[in-house]
Image (cartoon, coloured by chain):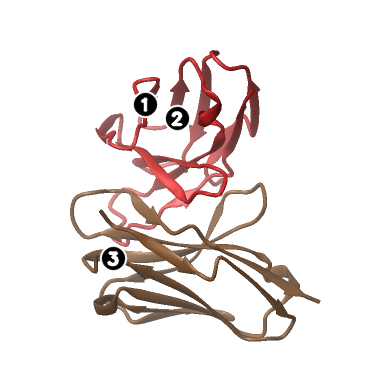
Amino acid sequence: GAGVSQSPSNKVTEKGKDVELRCDPISGHTALYWYRQSLGQGLEFLIYFQGNSAPDKSGLPSDRFSAERTGGSVSTLTIQRTQQEDSAVYLCASRRAGETRGEQFFGPGTRLTVL
Amino acid sequence: KQEVTQIPAALSVPEGENLVLNCSFTDSAIYNLQWFRQDPGKGLTSLLLIQSSQREQTSGRLNASLDKSSGRSTLYIAASQPGDSATYLCAVKERTGANNLFFGTGTRLTVIP
């Protein structure tokens, strides 16, 4: 079966532009997570969705970052007025409803470069 | 706040050698611990997940152990192969509160043919 997919795989943008990153979770997975992996840093949590609602947005670094999820499936992470420090790999993960082990499955990531 | 540390940051071994990767975490109130593999430019592949009530999990040449009380986990790789070269990440899910995983910074493994 299909895993978590993300698009684009690579995105190069100029400072100040807005970008949208897309995540398609595994079908039937109700929980969805966004993480960021900066060069030389570990993965840091950004936001968690349960269905279409986001009960935990505690990891979003600034109000330039936002995310939404529609139909309990696809999620979009939007970064407005991008800065060079936003350059990172953005990873999405999903988890099956009722999965008591809490196992998360990750997509291949989107590598964002802000010039 | 939960902090996860992995040592060493990088490791090079000759093919065939057995090796151990280490992971430590500061808050022992975890729900589970997961080991991942990350290849350059790729996402994360889940290798093993250990529930807090378990002591170890095995998959093929991989064995992960968990000592929750001391805040430690090890990933043992037997008879290493060049294809094992990758970055290995451990991550913990806390029992209460946060739904996200807390990740270590990883160990970059190179297996030399």
Which chain is in brown here? B
Q: Nearer the viewer, mark 2 or mark 1?
A: 2
Q: Nearer the viewer, mark 3 or mark 2?
A: 3
Residue B62 image point, x, y percent: 54, 78
Q: Residue at x 24, y 65 (%)?
A: B27
Residue B37 image point, x, y percent: 56, 61
**Which element carries disc 2, helix, strand or loop?**
loop
Q: Chain of mark 3?
A: B
**Is B44 on the left or on the right of B68, as rendered?**
right
Q: CA distance from mark 2 to mark 1?
A: 7 Å
Q: Chain of mark 1?
A: A
**Which element carries disc 3, helix, strand or loop?**
loop
Looking at the rendered structure, which numbered label has been put on residue A74? 2
Which residue in the structure is indicated by mark 1? A71
Amino acid type, callout 1:
Gly
Q: On the same chain: label 3 and label 2?
A: no
Which residue in the structure is indicated by mark 3? B26
Amino acid type, callout 2:
Val
Q: Residue furthest left?
A: B96
Q: Residue furthest right?
A: B113
Which one is in front, B82 or A7? B82
